[in-house]
Amino acid sequence: MAVRNSITVAVVAATVLVFLSTVISWLIVRNNIQSSGRIGRCQFLPMALPHIMLDCIDVCVSHGQSRIYGTIWIIVVAYVTTYLTYGTRLLNSTMFQIHKELEEVAQVSGASSPGFSEPS
């Protein structure tokens, strides 16, 4: 039971973390919206708090308000909030290395735009 729970937490937390980090990094690097600066600053919020404090906040918030209290899912939430900064910073540097011309060439060739809209 403990091994299964550990594998479940590792796989789910890593998958959610990679997905969220990719979306946040794309919003920061490729999107020209005004709130991307705020998103970039908010990603560093978990670094300002100690990890134990984040775990306590997660437990206190979920206690009595949701069904994840006392389950392995609160650990997944704690891991994702703790390591989101690291994943986002790693993907930011990767996305800076991919030039926008590559996206323009893909759009000319008929690919849909990265903004998830249909090609015109």
Image: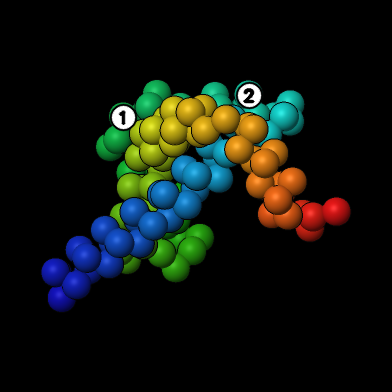
Would you call the spot at circle 2 few (<14 residues within 10 Å), some (14-19), or many (20 or more)?
Answer: few
Which residue, given by chain and number where applicable, does mark 1 sit on? 50
| Residue drawn at point x = 43 percent, y = 55 percent | 16
Amino acid type at mark 1:
Pro
Residue 14 visible, this angle: yes
Is residue 99 placed above or below 8 in the rendered structure? above
Q: Image height check: is 111 above or below 5?
A: above
Q: Earlier in the sequence, mark 1 or mark 2?
A: 2
Asked whether, in this view, residue 88 is left or right of residue 52, the answer is right
x%, y% of residue 100?
63, 32
Looking at the picture, tell me which residue is in the foreground, 113 or 107: 107
Residue at mark 2: 37
Q: Residue furthest front?
A: 109
Is 120 on the left-hand or right-hand side of 66? right
Q: Residue at x 14, y 69 (%)?
A: 3
Q: Nearer the viewer, residue 61 or 19?
A: 19
Query: Going by the image, does 4 lie left or right of 108?
Result: left
Instruction: Please tell me in which quadrant of the rendered image residue 5 appears.
Output: bottom left
